[in-house]
Amino acid sequence: MKKTLFAGLLASVVSVGALAGDMMKKDIVDTAAGAGTFKTLLTAAEAAGLVDALRGDGPLTVFAPTDDAFAALPEGTVENLLKPENKAQLQAVLTYHVVPGKVMAETVASGKLRKATSLQGDTIDISIENGPMVDGANIVATDIEASNGVIHVIDSVILPN
């Protein structure tokens, strides 16, 4: 009886450990997909051929616009960007939302980071004076950790110069 109880307990501990390990294995793409509010961003990343990069080793910081943020763009903007002939422009827009390294909210809140160079190559402005913002978009949720970086949720799509 004790052996059976111990074996059952051990199996439960192993299962919980495996589940925790699986959660830690979620990369930026899987983490965003699990949130359910980034369908447009993930569709765009797929169309731009950037999914593998967002699944890479990182670390990366993604300032992720929600579906509502994409919906707020002028009518037809998203559909136009998703066209195959506009792939380079879509890549530029999406990589403008990504910064190399893992930038946590504490770093932004401390004022230590005011500018960051995006993967697209342009500099994005980060401010805290009127609440945390990146290039004029409000940061509405922070520090959503993934195995290869961190996601900060923003309320609008930011565009390179």
Image (cartoon, helix red, strand yellow):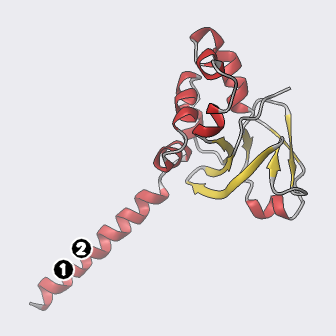
Decide: few, some or many residues near mark 1? Use Cα within 10 Å; few <14, some 14-19, many ≥20: few
In the foreground, 19 or 36: 36
Q: Position of residue 63 (x, y in %)?
A: 70, 44
In the foreground, 134 or 92: 134
* Residue on which the image places disc 2: 11
* x 34%, y 70%: residue: 16
* x 61%, y 42%: residue: 66
In the foreground, 109 or 99: 109
- Which mark identifies residue 159? none
Image quadrant assignment for residue 144: bottom right
Q: Is residue 118 above or below residue 76?
A: below
Decide: few, some or many residues near mark 2? Use Cα within 10 Å; few <14, some 14-19, many ≥20: few
In the displayed structure, does residue 14 sit left or right of residue 129?
Answer: left
* x 56%, y 24%: residue: 49
Q: Is residue 155 above or below residue 119?
A: below
Under circle 1, the secondary element is helix
* Residue on which the image places disc 1: 7
The amino acid sitting under disc 2 is Ala
Image quadrant assignment for residue 50: top right
Q: Position of residue 101 (x, y in %)?
A: 73, 48
Q: Position of residue 161 (x, y in %)?
A: 86, 26
Answer yes or no: do the residues labelled 1 and 2 have beta carbons within 8 Å? Answer: yes
Cα separation, mark 1 vs mark 2, equals 6 Å
